[in-house]
Amino acid sequence: MGLTSTSSREMFFSDCLVPKENLIGNEGEGTQVIGKTVVGWGFFGAAAISVGIARSATELAIKHARERAIAGQPIAVHQAVQFMITDMILGNEAAEAFLKVCAARADSTQGAAVINGFKAKLLASEMAVDVTNKAIQVMGGHGYCRDYIVERLFRDARGLTLHFKTSEWLRQDIAKAALGL
């Protein structure tokens, strides 16, 4: 349905020998190391993809609003379109800034990658759904057709609210961390 341009696969390592000097963490603790490091950073990747999707949708909606004319005027002159474009721009900028803040926190604090990755991914992926939905609205019937890329961007954005962990699962994990549970 979405994310057709990404490749998610399961990986198996069997009979894989790693020299002692190349081990990350202690032998037998690989799952914990991956869970605390690699997986946390994966959420940042999903957040960055979400920001990119939203930025593309915003640019396409702006272009369409300038070019699409009804009754001799571009739809960009209408307040409702302007408000949606403004919300899209603000959503993009807020999510991008928050992603950078979370990445800086994760970089500077031991063990902070996972929770900050959760926060960045949750905010950015939900913002991307909102922005792509608004882009479809700005573009009207054109935005809904498969002939226009905004339709695919919406599917991709929606997929990112499910990828890794769902938004609901992330909310629960973020709340548990804040509450000390």
Image: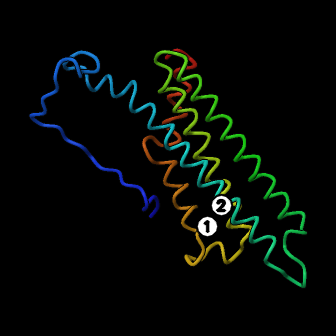
**Left or right of 86, for residue 106:** left
Q: Which SS class for mark 1?
A: helix
Marked residue nearer the N-terminal end (2 or 1): 2
Closer to us: 20 or 96? 20
Q: Which SS class for mark 2?
A: helix
Quadrant in which residue 158 is drawn? bottom right
Residue 142's spot in the image, x, y percent?
Answer: 66, 77
- Give me the disc on residue 150: 1
Crowding at label 1, few (<14), some or many (≥20) Cα neighbours within 10 Å? many
Residue drawn at x 81%, y 71% as measured from the top left: 66
**Left or right of 179, for residue 61:** right
Position of the N terminus by quadrant: bottom left
Real-space Cα separation, disc 2 to disc 1, in angstroms: 6 Å
Residue drawn at x 83%, y 80% as measured from the top left: 69
Name above or below for residue 96 compared with residue 66: above
The number of discs equals: 2
| Pointers 2 and 1 in contact (C-beta within 8 Å) | yes
Quadrant in which residue 57 is drawn? bottom right
Residue 5's spot in the image, x, y percent?
Answer: 43, 60
Name above or below for residue 17 compared with residue 84: above
Q: Circle 2 sits on which residue? A: 57
The amino acid pointed to by label 2 is Ala
The amino acid pointed to by label 1 is Val
Name above or below for residue 34 compared with residue 66: above
